[in-house]
Amino acid sequence: MNVPMDPESQRILEIVKANLLEVVFDLNPDDIVPESNMTDLGANSIDRVEVVMYASEALQVNVPTVELHGASTLADLVEIFKRHTSDRSR
Amino acid sequence: MQRAREHEVVCTGGGVICSIASSMTELGLALREGQRGVQVLPPELITARGPRVAARVQDFDHVRWLEEIETPVSGIWKRARKVLHNATRSTRLGAVAAVEAWRDARLDAEDPALGAGTGIIVAGSNLSQDYMAENLGALAASERRVNPKFAVSYSDSNQVGCLSQMLGVRGPGMTVGAASASGNAALFQAWHWVRAGVVERCVVVGAASVLSPVELEAFGILGAASLTGEASAAPRPFDKGHDGFVWGEAAAAVVLESGESARRRSVSARGRVLGVSLLLDARHGPEPVAAAEVQAMRAALAAAGVSAQEIDYVNAHGTGSPAGDRAECEALREVFGLGPGRPRINATKALLGHGLSSAGLVELLACLLQVEGGFLHGNPNLVQPIDAQLSLVAVDAESSEVRLALSNSFGFGGFNSSLVISAP
């Protein structure tokens, strides 16, 4: 299950994680893994929007909200962000 | 069928944060010593025609405050840290006042039965104008984005939810708005709830009105705010040199509770709230109406079953606005007359400014602390009284045995409210 991430995915995950810790505030960093679901970690609907918004700003991408609906884990979110960062680099 | 008995309403807890105090104990000392919190505003809040001074809470850090009063393992501490993270300044100020009142009343946030019998009323509307201005600015500057939390946090009623989560309260809750009379209006509502047995107790929070430069500019243009540049010169309630109110950032909270509940929990009362009134004057503007103020005072006395002659002390609305001060003097003469035994009068806004939404709560606490401490605070800028026949306390505090007090709050929009309190 724990597939090692490539360096770009790892970089994006760290950005998401940092923002999640900032927004939700009382999380244990060790509990945040790629398989985590933000809701299960205690993020409410506003917290989730904030995390995505701040991470998008940090990554300088603009992800349409509709694309985010399919993401259930942090790994899914990282994949979506990665698609947009690579779009931009082309 | 027997009519339901009306409950006695006592105050079992208080909490406050303002320019001159960050606890009940500090407020009692500051009032007695006549400390004043007015300072020159920082440049970002000074506008072309707005005020130059205000009594704001300096160096407020809600985390530091919580660490002083709550042990880091308590449920309240944990929930407050989470709820107040990224919350508005008004929400944080109100929350620390509420937590102090909650602890003062020796309530347990982890007791579900207690939470079910408790209500919350937050006094005030348009509380986070700083936050409105900040997000409007973010929207206008295209490179920045609006905070997603704004969708929830712009609404004052979010403060009710934040408090309920922190304190584990599951009874009724709402905000109550009546401009500068919001505090008394919230107490009016809570008093009726406790009296009728709708709740066993109610946390009433006078939330801080945190202004932006827009409100300050408008109050300046309207002529309601003092435009002095000298922090020691204003406000001057009931003094001939009065030229308007001074904004005093403050939050204050009380727990109103039925006498039975307080006795059952073996907690002592800080005082009793005997009667409250709230009356409109059928005019929506900022102008005070002395006749309506008379009606409000008489209605509160009637609700309390107390005569005007029995009142020892009046905590005046006394903002330092010329029109407001004149109307209140006229109303006080009408209700109390000028004979012997007339009540002593002071204005707490002379020390810590006008909290707007929170004023009624701050002044209720001032009444309770003065009754308890056996003193009346001074009116520090009262040099030449506009009405020499009224029994105004002089510049310095005096000792006094107050048993019955009346506190006035009047608000733009035609809100007139008084409350009558007594020693426990």
Image: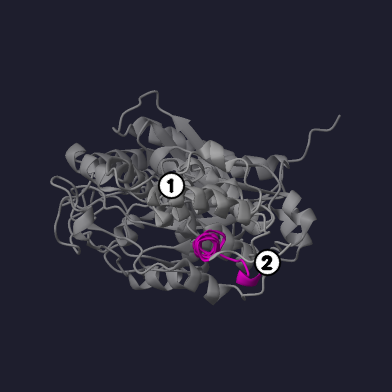
Looking at the image, is B395 positioned above or below residue A39?
Answer: below
Report which residue position mark 2 lands on: B75
Q: Chain of mark 2?
A: B
x, y percent for residue B204: 56, 50
Q: Residue at x 30, y 58 (%)?
A: B350
| Magenta residue check for B365 | no
Closer-to-camera residue (B75/B176):
B75
Residue at mark 1: A87
Estimate the x, y position of residue B19 in percent, counting from the top left. Answer: 35, 64
Residue B341 appearing in the image:
no
Quarter of the rendering occupied by the N terminus of chain B: top right
Q: Which residues are magenta?
A: A7-30
Q: Position of residue A41 (x, y in %)?
A: 66, 59
Report whether mark 2 lies on the same chain as mark 1.
no
Residue density around tag 1, few if under 14, some if 14–19, many if 20 or more, within 10 Å: few
User: Which quadrant holds the C terminus of chain B?
Assistant: bottom right
Q: Main secondary structure of the magenta part?
A: helix
Q: Can you give x and y, in whole percent of width and height, for residue A33 in the image?
A: 65, 64
Q: Chain of mark 1?
A: A
Q: Secondary structure at mark 2?
A: helix
State the separation of the CA atoms marked 2 and 1: 46 Å
Question: Mark 2 Cα within 10 Å, few/some/many (few <14, many 20+)?
Answer: some
Q: Is residue B49 left or right of residue B200?
A: left
